[in-house]
Image (tube, rainbow, N blue to C red):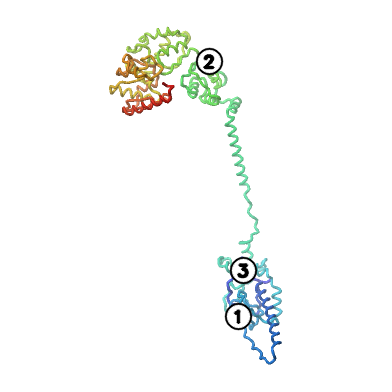
Amino acid sequence: MAQNPPERPEPPAFPAVNRPPSPPQTPATDSGERPPMTRREARAAREAQERRAEESQAQAEQVQQQPTSAQPEEPQEPSAPVAGAPVSAAQSPSATPWSLFDDSTPISSPIPSQETPADRAALDGLDFDAVITGPIAHVEEPETVSVAARHGSDDQTPSHHDHPARTIFGVLEETEDDSAQDEHPLVWRQQNYLSHDEPPKKRRWVKRLIVTIVVLGILGGMAGAAYAIFQPQIAKVQNALFPPENDYKGTGTGEVMFTIKSGDDGSTISENLAKAGVVKTYDAFYSLLLRQKPDVEFQPGVFKLAKQMSAAAALAALKDPSSRVENTAVIPEGTPEKDILQTVSDATKIPLADLQTAAANPAAYGLPAEAKSLEGFLFPATYTFAPGTTAQQAIKTMVDRMFQALDEAGVAPQNRWNTVVLASVVQREAGLKDDYPKVARVFLNRLAQGWDLQSDATVAYGTGHTDRVETTDAEREDAGNPYNTYVHPGLPVGPISNPGDLAINAVQHPADGTWMYFVTWNLQTGETIFSTTQAEHEAAVEKWQQWMRDNPGYE
């Protein structure tokens, strides 16, 4: 194969378009060795030979046609070599060099008779593929020889731009690193263009891991949804197979009278059952209660239960009407005396007349001297009376319970009367739990300022309508009603209901404020507006009246 300079091959370029002109070259080297020709040089040389042959034939024909008398033309001097054009090694110094890049310049060369066998051997043995692409296999590292040295130029500095292939790819060569000049062209090509290395193996385990995680997440979500839907059934099976350690087993032993008060919710009942020793833990009963569909509604009363019952057994007993003790009286807060006596009579089967007769002597039960009846001193609660209880015993039980509540609230015996009277008014007037201390403060502020209480609840009580608070203009102007606080100053002549712990504590610990008025404008929710000035109070009254017009059922 023809030897090419061991320089790094560059990407192909089109010399006729973008190859810069080559520097001037010398015809030949001192040693007379012939440099290898590129494919383009060989093609140009052959075309030049053909043109020279045609010119020679044309000249010969002209000579034959000219007259003998004509003077022979003087031989023309050969044209000077074109700067930068490579020449054939077979050219003689008198031959006209040919240009590879300037097609406008006529190409002249020696006549065909001057072509030597060495020229034909060089053309016939030229490897065109090696000229363009460089050597395919590298056997030994050849010595770098510039174009100028091959053409016999001793005074020109060797340059890696001299070789025609370097000229073709010279546009891109300037961007390369000088450190790569000594590399073999095949090595450079393999590193930058062609790679026969196997591509890196893909990490397929990452994809498998991601797919596994996604599948597990979907399965986990489906399992969670199924558990949420069938959780009650699963819990029942689980409790049947593996009873929880926080619960008793069986129906228990002994007897416990368990009371459910009005307003007790599931959490309160669960806590009271655990405190009474009926169930083992709060969670055992409450968790069972939450799983019931529909929700269980408990009725106030006294129930006969047992010690150490399972949560399921206790719940079944509370839902069983036969477990309810009939001698139970449930008395809500604010209930007047006459309604309490009727409730006790119904629960204990004590005749109502006997209870009324026993209640006619308040002093017999330790009430203050101002008391003319038991009103205000029958503490509202749930009572269970043993069979055979008398009327006097039943009344005394309720009065003693009131004294206990007053003592626990810190009410001195000499203050019991005023405290119970005001607490009975607060109990009837206040709606929401948080409003009790505010209502107590309004009444205390009015008493301190010498204002009338102006409580509709007291007026209604004096008319005998203990089931309502609203009054008419005529009722509020009736001075014959001793409980009319619109016309009679100070506290009413006696309690108007039987207050509970909330009202008693509100009187003992009223809220801080300058309010002088309040209006419960929404009788359905119990929302109340507290005002300090008359203008504020009138606006609140208008709001209440509008609500009454919008809700005629409350008139």
Disc 3 or 1, which lies upstream in sequence?
3
Read off the residue under disc 3: 14
Read off the residue under disc 2: 323
Amino acid on which disc 3 is placed: Phe
Read off the residue under disc 1: 81
Disc 2 or 3, which lies upstream in sequence?
3
- State the SS at label 1: loop
Residue 434 seen by the camera: no
* Residue sitting at x 62%, y 84%: 78
Q: CA distance from mark 2 to mark 3?
A: 110 Å
Closer to the camera in the image, 24 or 485: 485
Other residues around mark 3 within 10 Å, as few (<14) / some (14–19) / many (≥20): few
- State the SS at label 3: loop
Other residues around mark 1 within 10 Å, as few (<14) / some (14–19) / many (≥20): many
Among the 4 quarters of the image, the one containing residue 353: top left
Where does residue 136 sit, x and y in percent of width and height? 67, 66
Q: CA distance from mark 3 to mark 1?
A: 24 Å
* Residue sitting at x 33%, y 18%: 476
- State the SS at label 2: helix
Amino acid on which disc 2 is placed: Ser
In the image, residue 396 sits, relative to residue 429, either above or below, namely above
Where does residue 389 sit, x and y in percent of width and height? 45, 9
Q: CA distance from mark 2 to mark 1?
A: 133 Å
